[in-house]
Image: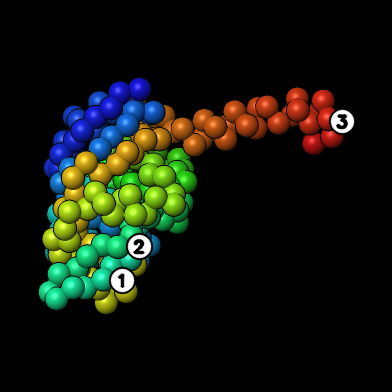
Amino acid sequence: MVTYKLTTPISEEDARKLRVNDVVYITGTIVTARDQAHHRALQFHKEGKELPINFEGLALFHCGPIVKKEGDRWIIVAAGPTTSTRMDIFEDEFIQNFKARVIIGKGGMGKRTTDAMQKYGAVYGAFTGGAAVLAAKAIKSVKTVEWLDLGMPEALWILETEEFGPLTIAIDSHGNNLFEDIKNKTEENRIPIYRKLGIQK
């Protein structure tokens, strides 16, 4: 396990240095995006429309933040991760088309996303669920917000961060997926345990 402190934009070379179980802190631009933002971004790409931000080299955070406005400034109150499996149907295309280098969330992602990360040079950083206030403390400012018509949780919040983390690399760009490994190991151990308990499965 190695700890890295990375600054956006993150290069493909730097993303490929990261391995499962490494710990990462990110300084620079992180963009929140959930289901609707993923869908709209990919639709814009298909229609040849310009996106409001260039995602290349940035960190994409599966998050619906709680935000308040003070005067003309937006303040992030809490920024807990959203379950990433919701975005699994979009993420491979998103990585291919937009070259985001770090995907942040909780709960892991599947084979399609893992394959895309291996092919294009990206990683998945797991952030602890329930630590929304900790995440907010690393967010220094809201640079801007886009697609607010989707609603506060679904908009693209473009955030300036300082040492956002700790993120545990759970999927790397070498085909390793910590969540899949644990699932497979659990499945391997299930049968002998059931047998010991006299349960037929």
Q: Mark 1 belongs to which amino acid?
A: Met
CA neighbours of label 3 inside 10 A, class few (<14), some (14 to 19), many (20+) = few
Residue ID at (79%, 31%):
194
Residue at numbered disc 2: 64
| Front-lying residue, 196 or 111 | 196
Looking at the image, residue 183 sits to the left or right of residue 159; the answer is right
Q: Position of residue 56 (x, y in %)?
A: 17, 47
User: Which residue is rendered at x = 26% and y = 51% of the image?
Assistant: 137
Percent position (x, y) of residue 77? 30, 63
Q: Sequence order check: which comes first, mark 2 or mark 3? A: 2
Q: Classify 10 Å Cα crowding around label 2: few (below 14), some (14-19), many (20 and above).
A: many
Q: Residues within 10 Å of mark 1 (few under 14, many from 20)?
A: some
The alpha-carbon separation of the residues under discs 1 and 2 comes to 7 Å
Q: Quadrant of residue 118?
A: top left
Q: Are marks 3 and 1 in contact (CB under 8 Å)?
A: no
Q: Secondary structure at mark 3?
A: loop
Amino acid type, label 2: Gly
- Under tag 2, what secondary structure? loop
Q: Would residue 195 be seen by someone viewing this image from the given angle?
A: yes
One can see residue 56 in this view: no
Residue 167: x percent and y percent? Answer: 33, 39
In the image shown, does 48 or 59 lie closer to the viewer? 59
User: Is the Cβ of the residue at disc 1 closer than 8 Å to that at disc 2?
Assistant: yes
Type of amino acid under label 3: Gly
Q: In the rendered image, which residue does mark 1 sit on? A: 152
Point out the image quarter for the C terminus. top right
CA gap, disc 3 and disc 1: 52 Å
Q: Is residue 149 above or below residue 37?
A: below
Q: Which mark is residue 198?
A: 3
